[in-house]
Image (cartoon, rainbow, N blue to C red):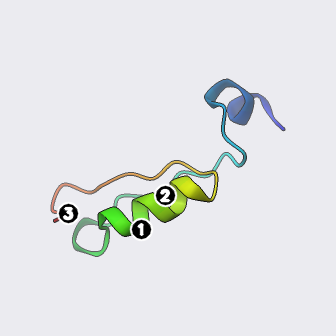
Amino acid sequence: MNRVAKALNIKYPIVQGPLAWLTDAKLVAAVANAGGIGTLGPAAG
């Protein structure tokens, strides 16, 4: 585990990019459940 993953208490230091219209809560939840950091885009809905 590297310093970033350890500091954020995550398994993998992967940040899912906010993909505007393509990102929804299901994708963010899937990324978070897999150990990464999920983010919602400004047009998510």
Badge 1 is on which residue? Answer: 27
Circle 2 packing at 10 Å, graded few (<14), some (14-19), many (20+), is some
Mark-to-mark CA distance, 1 and 2: 9 Å
Q: Residue reaching furthest right?
A: 1
Side (left or right) of 39 relative to 13: left
Residue at 32% from the left image edge and 62% from the top image edge: 25
Q: Which is more N-terminal, label 1 or label 3?
A: 1
Q: Which is more N-terminal, label 3 or label 2?
A: 2
Side (left or right) of 17 relative to 18: right
User: Are discs 1 and 2 less than 8 Å apart at CB?
Assistant: yes
Q: Residue 5's quadrant in the figure?
A: top right
Along the viewing direction, whichever of 33 and 2 lies nearer the viewer: 33
Badge 3 is on which residue? Answer: 44
Q: Which is more N-terminal, label 2 or label 1?
A: 2
Give the quarter of the figure containing the N terminus. top right
Circle 1 packing at 10 Å, graded few (<14), some (14-19), many (20+), is some
Residue 28 image offset from top left, x and y in percent: 41, 59
Side (left or right) of 8 relative to 23: right
Q: Residue 18's quadrant in the figure?
A: bottom left
Q: Residue 44's quadrant in the figure?
A: bottom left
Circle 3 packing at 10 Å, graded few (<14), some (14-19), many (20+), is some
Badge 2 is on which residue? Answer: 16
Side (left or right) of 13 relative to 25: right
Residue 13 image offset from top left, x and y in percent: 67, 45
Question: Mark 2: which amino acid?
Answer: Gln
Tell me if residue 40 comes above or below residue 8 in the rendering: below
Q: Residue reaching furthest top?
A: 7
